[in-house]
Each structure stands twice: as C-alpha cells, then as structure tokens.
Amino acid sequence: MSSVFLALGSNLDAPKQQILSAIAALEKDPRITVHAVSSLYQTPAMGPPQDDYINAVMHLSTAYSARELLALCLGLEKQQGRIRIEPWGPRCIDIDILLYDDMQYQEKDFIVPHPGLKERLFVLVPLYEIAPQWILPDGTAIATVLQRFGDEEITLIRRILS
C-alpha cells in the first residue's frame, strides 16, 4: 500500500457538498483506506475573478499505482460534473495528487509532488493540520515550508473529521 495525500477544491455547485461527495466516493473504494481528512478551508481563488474556493486535504493508503489513482481522481471529477473550460477557472471539483509515497516523478501530464505544493497556502495549511510532522520527498518539513508565509488569510469553515 502506498501513502498518498490528495487536495480537493471546489467553488461551484455547492462547494462543500462537492468536497464531501468526493471524500465519500474515495472512502467507499475497496482499494483505498482513508486515514485523515482535514477541516474545510475557504480561500481566495487563483486565476480569473471568481468565487472563493473550499479546500481540504486527505491522507490515504492505496493499492492503486500513481497513474491508476490519477485516472480514478479524473474519473471522479467527471462524475461530479467537472468540465475543463479554462485554466485556473471555476470548477465544481478538483482532486490533485499532492504526494505519493516519496515519489518524485515528472511527465508532461503528471508531476508528483504536485508542482504548486510549496506555494499554495490553501494546500499547506490543511496538509499541516493532518500531518504536521510530514517530511516532503526533498527532505523539507511541512512546518518549514509554512514558515515562509506571512499573514495570508485562510479561513476555517468547519471540521469534517477529527
């Protein structure tokens, strides 16, 4: 089994419910064991003007390969109605593989760790919430990465699981 962290985000079509639906679908998969889910966070959108996002991070173990998990996540996005119209545009659900074991992998359509991981507070804060001692594949602690940020605002919405 591989240890994986996924980021989930939504700003369309009842964002909180979109996140919860994606989590529920992943929890039902027999090849996945969910260990932790962060609280939900509201953050300003990146990209064109649009509504704020709701974000969460989950830690799971899986028997899926990294590519199989990517295909599963893309399939879940499609099932929940995601249509890719514009880069960084609004979306009903976005599921990204942040970390897959200690894998460092790069192809045109798939990069692990996620290339924006260290620059996105909306991913780092929920990741730190559920795995404060986690060390990234390059040897950097999540806590160290978080120290680089000043007082950027991220708002706790509600706790999903303790």
Image (spheres, rainbow, N blue to C red):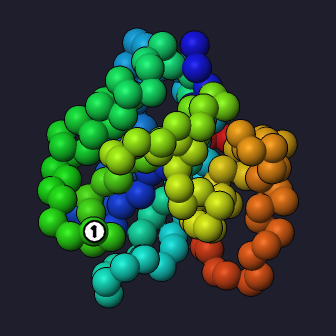
Residue 3 placement (x, y as % from top left): 61, 26
Q: Quadrant of residue 92?
A: bottom left
Image point (64%, 81%), residue name: 153
Residue 98 lies left or right of residue 101; in this view the side is left
Near-viewer residue (136 or 77): 136
Residue reaching furthest bottom?
A: 49
Q: What secondary structure is found at the residue carrying circle 1? A: loop
Q: Report the residue at 80% width, 50% height from top.
A: 140
Q: In the drawing, does residue 108 fall left or right of residue 126?
A: left
Image quadrant where residue 84 sits: bottom left
Q: How many marks?
A: 1
Residue shown at the point (48%, 79%) measured from the top left: 44
Residue nearest the observer in this picture, 57 or 148: 148
User: Does residue 52 appear left or right of residue 133 in this picture?
Assistant: left
User: Could you tell me which residue is drawn at 45 percent across and 64 percent down?
Assistant: 54
Q: Is residue 149 visible?
A: yes
Reading the image, the residue beneath label 1 is: 87
Q: Amino acid at mark 1?
A: Pro
Residue 24 coordinates in the image, percent (x, y): 39, 33
Residue 46: percent from the left, percent from the top?
43, 77
Q: Is residue 2 above or below residue 45?
A: above
